[in-house]
Amino acid sequence: MVSVVKRLFVGRPLRTDRMGEVLLPKRLALPVFCSDPISSVAYATEQILLTLALGAVFLSLAVPVAAAVVLVLVVVVASYRQTCHAYPSGGGAFAVSRDNLGEQAALVAASALLVDYVMTVAVSVTAGVVAVTSAFRELVPHTATITALLIVLLALVNLRGARQSGRVFAVPTYGFVAVVLLMFVVAAVRAVTTGLPPSDAPILSEPPTVHTGGILTLALALRAFASGCTALTGVEAISNGVPAFEKPKARNAATTLAVMGALAAVLFTGITVLALEIHARAVPSGSPSVLSQIGASVFGHATVLYYLLQATTAGILILAANTAFNGFPTLASILAGERYLPRQLHNRGDRLAFSNGILLLAVTAAVLVLAFNANIDRLIQLYIIGVFTSFTLSQAGMVRHWKRELAGTTDPARRTGLRRAQAINAVGALLTAVVLAVVFATKVPHGAWLAVVAMVVLFFAMRSISVYYRRFEAEVSAPGGLPTLPPRVTAVVLVSRLHQPALHALALARATRPDRLDAVSVEVDEAETRTLCRDWERRGIDVPLLVLSSPYRELVRPVVDHVRRLRQSDPAGVVTVFVPVYVVTRWWQNLLHNQSALRLRARLMATPGVVVVSVPYHLGRADQGWLSEVDIAAPRHPEPTRRTTPTP
Amino acid sequence: MVSVVKRLFVGRPLRTDRMGEVLLPKRLALPVFCSDPISSVAYATEQILLTLALGAVFLSLAVPVAAAVVLVLVVVVASYRQTCHAYPSGGGAFAVSRDNLGEQAALVAASALLVDYVMTVAVSVTAGVVAVTSAFRELVPHTATITALLIVLLALVNLRGARQSGRVFAVPTYGFVAVVLLMFVVAAVRAVTTGLPPSDAPILSEPPTVHTGGILTLALALRAFASGCTALTGVEAISNGVPAFEKPKARNAATTLAVMGALAAVLFTGITVLALEIHARAVPSGSPSVLSQIGASVFGHATVLYYLLQATTAGILILAANTAFNGFPTLASILAGERYLPRQLHNRGDRLAFSNGILLLAVTAAVLVLAFNANIDRLIQLYIIGVFTSFTLSQAGMVRHWKRELAGTTDPARRTGLRRAQAINAVGALLTAVVLAVVFATKVPHGAWLAVVAMVVLFFAMRSISVYYRRFEAEVSAPGGLPTLPPRVTAVVLVSRLHQPALHALALARATRPDRLDAVSVEVDEAETRTLCRDWERRGIDVPLLVLSSPYRELVRPVVDHVRRLRQSDPAGVVTVFVPVYVVTRWWQNLLHNQSALRLRARLMATPGVVVVSVPYHLGRADQGWLSEVDIAAPRHPEPTRRTTPTP
């Protein structure tokens, strides 16, 4: 049943040798990796206006703030292009930091990125749903539910594999870019001819006007700038995803990055200008969005083009989360491969995607959306603090990288190129560090502390896991030489009555030829024990039967105590405990059996030198394996073991 | 941790040989077994008035209805006294029905009783809480929560064992009887001297007056009678509990039953007379209760005696549920002993009480109370239909019982006695059958259908379990002869790398001397497999290593397929699969290991002829059992098995 449902949604498993098929050409890589930074223009302007609206007179600050955001975007894109070239095998902040700044810095970068990928999903999908509710206001009360369902849908698409996703995502991404550019053209024409009508958003009660003054103005501008920097999230994804590009990987990735940067800068600038032009009003709950207000003003209400704008906005935003659905599982897999996260995150699933990482991301983001009731203004406070942490570490690492390269190069032309690259990264590192400081100072008091806590927890969790796996590795690594046999094997067969399951267990224990073999029964009911002993005697079973008294009517403890005593009397030996277990055909039948066997197994497994053998007895099946062919007393001669090693 | 908490609430385990201590003298047996029928006088009158109030003019019917209830009570008590004598080992409806009417009737009786015990707990505790909220109205909104918590408390008291419960319950039971009798005296004196003030209950909007008319009057009277019969629940408990009495058990039980019947009849009659005298008004939500109104009228508001009445009422009602906490687990244990219920219900727990039955009862009753929001009027509709089902079957069975006895007796004096007993039970059977018909007709439309459904489900569940256990018994019962050895044992050791856990598993597999021993590895990562093969070769391990390809990167399926192929090639043999399993010291470390091993074990256990041996490797412990003492190739000579059988 489960597997049928899985096949239906996720598709048939793919063979490992079909790995090569999931490489992406540039035109598909752009929508897969860049929908996040491009789509964030849909809310970055709004976040600036929302902050500045706290002091209505400051709206004129929007232009310099937006310009600063574009400047940072250009510098970061330029800086990351260097990374693509330097790390063609995938140069995420984690890899770069570890290579150049050491393990601690790398783990800080990794924690920051993991948190931010989750936020990307939560914020982008929520903003996408807001684009829909801006057009259809009656859906506003269901925002959180719709958002969570869409996150689940995204997870399914990604579980099917990357190639398919690329195609699915191309249409809304390119569509969004085309519609917004068209909007700019129409707006320009109308502005010159008929003029643009002002925003149709309802005027809320005026917010309290903040006192004007140098420091307060600066503080508000910085907060607006920090909010506007959401436009930069997701740039990291391309440098992490270089291996997914078609060859030449590094060059194609760098080109894609440049195209993305140019598009984002143009769209962001145009939308900001238009928002100021029509006096758009940012609404804290998010609906109607500023972009929706612009669209309604330029294209007119209820026109086909307005709905097309909302549809493509929703499309690119919802799918922007896909950047994170590519980045998060890849990073988690790298971290798991390096033993910083559980190993389950390392492996590719049925469809060659990192299934466990995808599921983990989707669940975390969905829980966050539901906990914050899809309030985009509160969610966005947790955002981008991680991105700029990793940006700063990554660029700083690149500066060191080029320094090392320079030390090993004498060719003057090559050295000039390296120096240029180093300069670009140095500017990038400095600028992103400044932005990080601004973001930290302005956002932590408004909710970003939660993101910081999550990062700290992740950091220490990964350190603990790493320490654990390293100790584990040291402990299990075999010294030279051949495996050794236990000097003595004592077998204990648990018997309650003399029935087929007990005889099976007894026969199997005999077949393992232990040095000593006891049957053990716990006396809970005196009459039953007497019957057992009489049957034992009558059948003439030549295995000693020990009866353990149990004054407190327990089954588990007397057996555990007995086994421990056996162990103490022979500390170097091994005790194998054979427990008959019933394998039933219907789930409810489990309620009628095996309760004690399960508890006994758990307790005995915790005792060193003890091995529990559950001997299954299949109820309701004629086919029980071996039966009644050789007497227990008959001698057997094991055939000589062979030695063959297959060619690897 | 868990065990410390358990000790704190439940107490230290008691040895089986202290069983004799939990026998009860009559003065303690009365509160333990009879608080239910005695306490139900606190709400039986109210239920009659509530029904009759639907047609306000019919309140005069209360007297004949109450008289009918007392008549039934006397007949049933007389009838059950015969049962105590006939079945000194415990003559619940189940035992009597099975002895005399066959299995089907017995299971019907058992289902009915189990449902009714649950209802006793739910209704009694709720009514007890209503006695408190009648005095302290501000608690009314928390009725359901308080009720559920009290049920949990009762479960804890009962898990500690019956003797303690007896003492705890004596005070409120005898206290209630004393206070109510005192109230009768005070009421009589005041009625003759100053007169009694009328009820203080708020007058609700008058219910619609039903048209007077012969049939409607009769229907209402019958419904009121059915509700009043709640006074009879719990009479069964004594006949079920005869073995818990001190010797002479049967005689003591019969005496206790008679005392209980007399007390209940007196209290019920007195309360009904007083209720009519002061014009008490039954309130559907339950608070203030009719008894509280009487107390306020007789003793005066906020007097010590009024609060004492409410306190003892609450006490006896809450503890009345104890009748069910004695009856339900005992009956469940008998049923489990006869293989009609899962065996876990059969055994006595740490404190010699039937712990699992107590827990099952408490959980079911608490869920019911919360689901019905502790609405006593709705809960009571589900009540007593089961009691009269079992009464009828039990009395009918007794008639047959005496008939059989008569057939085997010739002594005329003894025959007269038997005939008298048979006559009493015949009257009982007839009367309870009539009452059952009335209850069924008047209560099923008002919610009792749920109780009927529960009884039907229980009936078929018990039949299925019985059939299952019987088949199981037939299947596992050993034929004569000695246990047999499997003709061939093929051992498979699962290896991922050549580390200590794998070597342990390999050594243990070797020690079991299989006819064939293979190491098996699944190739998920080509490089890892190559390393394994090289290590294998270099160490010169003389066990063949098979590499299974896994194009879909699965670990479990290739192993399962391989093991199935081995089985098919040798259907009579047994395949033992050795899987290294890590035993960790902290719970979270389980997330880092063993995921595949668990799934593999589950899949392999379902395959006949396959035994899974989980070889534990204890991480972080120096003490690993056997280590490096004997080479795997060294021969071992098992010592001859000894044959000893302990004296039973």
Image (cartoon, coloured by chain):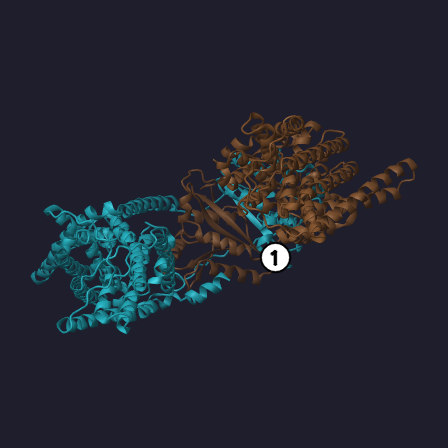
Chain colours: A brown, B cyan
| Number of numbered tags placed on the structure image | 1
Badge 1, how many Cα within 10 Å: few under 14, some, many 20+?
many
**Relative to A551, residue B331 above or below:** above
Which residue is the site of mark 1? B625
Q: Closest to the observer: B114 or A213?
A: A213
Q: Please, what is the three-letter code of the amino acid marked with disc 1?
A: Gly
Is there any visible trace of residue B54 in the rendered image? yes
**Relative to B184, residue A636 above or below:** above
**Relative to A488, residue A57 above or below:** above
- Residue B155, position as x, y percentages in the image: 37, 61
Query: Is A98 placed left or right of A381 in the picture?
Result: right
Query: Is B581 placed left or right of A534 in the picture?
Result: right
For mark 1, name the chain.
Answer: B
Residue extending furthest front? Answer: A194
Q: Please, what secondary structure does the residue beneath circle 1 have?
A: loop
- Residue A11, position as x, y percentages in the image: 56, 30
Q: Closest to the observer: A61 or B191?
A: A61
**Relative to B570, residue B294 above or below:** below
- Residue B157, position as x, y percentages in the image: 37, 65
Query: Is B150 placed left or right of B579 in the picture?
Result: left
Q: Closest to the observer: B83 or B646?
A: B83
- Residue B368, position as x, y percentages in the image: 34, 52
Residue extending furthest left? Answer: B412
Is there any visible trace of residue A158 in the rendered image? no
| Quadrant for the C terminus of chain B in the image | bottom left
Q: Closest to the observer: A507 or B426?
A: B426
